[in-house]
Image (cartoon, rainbow, N blue to C red):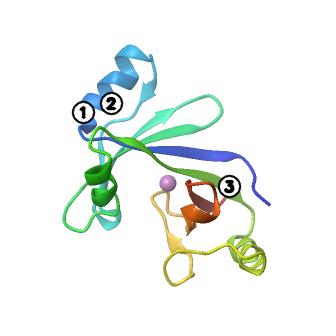
């Protein structure tokens, strides 16, 4: 069911500092800071040959990563995202196997303008899992 690793998302307390670290220390190919108000985040994409890293920082009230940063003030890995071919088929197969889908269970349009779902971290060894239909 799951395909390529689409991205790993890391919540960071200072997005400019994180961008500079990935560019200057790790030598990464980093984007500008991109505001995504509809998703409550500012993001920097780090393009790797085989996947992406997304550096996330809260934007506005009620950001989905604000609480995570309160619990992890120095930042931390927030989620991993896997490609799937058919997000509805993936959701239904996962639910049939007992995995919990977050929210109302309907795919939302994610940060890459593609349908996404999130799976409960307690069902996947403490890792929030995002599925993106490619
Ligand atoms: Co993501």
Looking at the image, which residue is at 23% across and 37% down?
14
Q: Of 103 and 134, which appears nearest the observer? A: 103
Quarter occupied by residue 24: top left
Q: Is mark 3 within 8 Å of ligand 1?
A: no
State the residue lying farthest toward the bottom. 104
Looking at the image, which residue is at 44% across and 16% down?
27
Q: Label 3, secondary structure: give it.
A: strand
Tell me where residue 18 appears, x and y as whole percent.
31, 31
- 94 to the left or right of 14: right
* Residue 35 visible within the image: no
- Residue at numbered disc 3: 83
Looking at the image, which residue is at 80% across and 61% down?
1
Q: Is mark 1 within 8 Å of ligand 1?
A: no
- Residue at numbered disc 1: 16
Disc 2: CA contacts within 10 A as few (<14), some (14-19) or many (>=20): many
State whether residue 21 is above or below residue 101. above
* Mark pair 3, 1: CA separation: 28 Å
- 90 to the left or right of 101: right
Give the numbered dot on residue 35.
none
* Mark pair 2, 1: CA separation: 5 Å
- Residue at numbered disc 2: 19
N-terminal of the two: label 3 or label 2? Answer: 2
Tell me where residue 53 appears, x and y as whole percent.
49, 38
């Amino acid at each position: 069911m799951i395909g390529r690793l689409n991205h790993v998302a890391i919540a960071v307390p200072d997005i400019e500092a994180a961008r500079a670290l990935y560019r200057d220390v790790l030598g990464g190919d980093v984007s500008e800071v991109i505001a995504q108000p509809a998703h409550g985040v500012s993001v920097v994409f780090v393009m790797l040959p085989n996947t992406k890293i997304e550096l996330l920082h809260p934007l506005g009230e009620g950001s989905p990563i604000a609480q995570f940063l309160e619990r992890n003030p120095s930042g931390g890995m927030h989620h991993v995202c896997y490609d799937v071919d058919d997000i509805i088929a993936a959701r239904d197969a996962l639910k049939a196997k007992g995995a919990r889908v977050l929210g109302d269970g309907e795919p939302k349009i994610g940060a890459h303008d593609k349908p996404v779902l999130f799976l409960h971290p307690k069902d996947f060894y403490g890792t929030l899992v995002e599925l993106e239909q490619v």
